[in-house]
Image (cartoon, grey):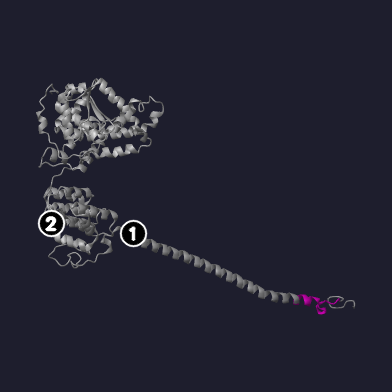
Amino acid sequence: MPTMKKNPNLSWLKSLVVLPSLDSKDYEYAGDREALKVLKSVPGAGWLFSQWIQFWLEFRRTNFLGSTIKVGPKQFPELNKLRIKAAELLLMKAPPLFVIEQPVMNAFTMGTDDKNSFVAITRPLLENATDKEILFILGHEFGHVKSQHALYATIAIYLANIGLFSGRIPFVHLLAFPLEIALKAWFRRSEITCDRAGLVCVQDLDAARRALLLLGCGSRELADQVDLDEFRKQSDEVASSYGKWSELFVTHPYLPKRIRCIETFADSHLYIRKIKKDKKSAFLDPEDLDDAVGSILGNEEVTTEKTKENTDLTRLKVSLAFAGAWSGGKPSKTLREDLSTLLAVSKLNAGESKRYRQYLDRPYPLKRALHDLRYFIGDRLKALPHFHSFLLRGSKGISFSKTRALTELSLACGLSAVETDGVVFEMGFRKRMFRERAGVDLCASCAHLIALSTLECSNCEAHSSSLETPDGIKVKRLGQRIEEVQRSASTLVTEAAGGIFGLIAQGIEAGAAGVRAATESDEDADEEKPKKAKKRAAVKKKKKSPQGKKKKGRGTGGQGRRA
């Protein structure tokens, strides 16, 4: 494969699409931002972000100026054109670029922010890479600057240079181990973000893959002999080995994963619709894209599906009905039967009907409904009654999560904040909105849909004009919920207090009864005392009387000596 030549033909740069606006969040990997938050939360990391990093960095930049070549209009002018173009494509200011002498193929970014960062690229990489591969590499490095990675990348380089992670400083590397893991976890995810930035610049998937292979192999000759299909299979072997955990200690994802991730980004809505201007191919929604990349990095099977803009209102109604039915957990048997009936009357094609039927027994995610709304071309509000109907019907109470889902879907259908508040909480407003803009009515009594030509609900026979709503399907505002909680708490307190006071009264009554019993016992005892005293006195008196004494006789017959 031809490498970058002297005075190369760079006319192809004119064909590249420059987007009217591009924020780093438009292509950043969500895991990158999340890992960066974790890094910032590591205890003891704050001191690393102090001003002394800038002091050390100034020495590095000065060293580069004194020992390397700074790219500009007169030094490496072709490379400078690629530098300027990469910055233009990412809608950012071009950072300084240095060519350095090192024996390896490499490029890296150092700095503190987008105003004080620079990029270095080694001579062997320049000698072996094509102009498109170099544009991808520059886009990748500039992506670090645009996403504010430079400071944290510089910290990692500095700590590695002073031996904090290698063990050259005794015992300190043990304390720094959590920081090392967090830094490297973030670093791996930041590489995914910046590979995407590189593809936004080069707009050629094959060139992006070849650039990654070149950096991985370190040889043009070897990189050109790699079969991409076979190379991808290596990631499957990695996933099945416990050795996969060694990736925790490296700063870049394993190369097969990086290539699969960049191929996945090439299926994104941003790349297909906005950059390639492809209006027909299916694409990955941003959330689905990040889910797929998370599965790749986590050695899991990718199960996300591509999507396309949709104009089929019936399909959107079915999607929102399933999302509504599953918003409160597993739907009842009756509700699943209602979903099955809806599928039957909707007359979707066989493939779509089969796809929805699998969700009769497994959760239908709310984000899938939001996804379908996002890419629906037409009046989305006409499908909203189906979400309300299947969420409300059969409910025994509308939870906070259900209320939040109603609000989120209503906003996604294009309603204003005021309209959303009315549709969610006011039955009268909801019925009027659905009648006027969706062409259907909603029964206030059972939440089934009613045709405008019908005066009664076919399910519960309630009149279509009725606003009487059972408490179980009434959506209540936060203030109402708080008042109910307060009333319930007051009732509980009153009942509890009543129970306590009852126990106290019973205790007092029992105590009083005991006192009365004791008093009565004492009174009886007092009455018995005189009687017993009299009886004892009588017995005593009787003993003292003459009649009580026995006469001395002669014998038992009374013939004894006379007194």
Residue 134 vertical placement versus 32 (above, below) = above
In the rendered image, residue 149, in percent from the top left (x then y), is placed at 27, 34
Q: Nearer the viewer, residue 114 or 222?
A: 114
- Asked which secondary structure carries label 2, the reply is helix
Q: CA distance from mark 2 to mark 1?
A: 42 Å
In the rendered image, residue 129, in percent from the top left (x then y), is placed at 17, 24
Could you say which disc has been placed on residue 411 in the image?
Answer: none
> Badge 1: few (under 14), some or many (20 or more) residues near its Cα, within 10 Å?
few
Given the image, on which type of amino acid does mark 2 rest? Answer: Val
Evaluate whether residue 534 shows in this view: yes
Task: Classify residue 438 by image quadrant.
Answer: bottom left
Tell me which segment is drawn in magenta: 538-552
On screen, residue 378 versus residue 256, left or right, reads left
Q: Is residue 551 magenta?
A: yes
- Residue at 14 percent across and 33 percent down: it is 203
Residue 341 vertical placement versus 148 (above, below) = below
Q: Which residue does the numbered mark 2 point to in the structure image?
A: 345
Given the image, on which type of amino acid does mark 1 rest? Answer: Ile
Could you say which disc has been placed on residue 482 in the image?
Answer: 1
Residue 185 vertical placement versus 73 (above, below) = below
- Asked which secondary structure carries label 1, the reply is helix
Q: Nearer the viewer, residue 430 or 399?
A: 430
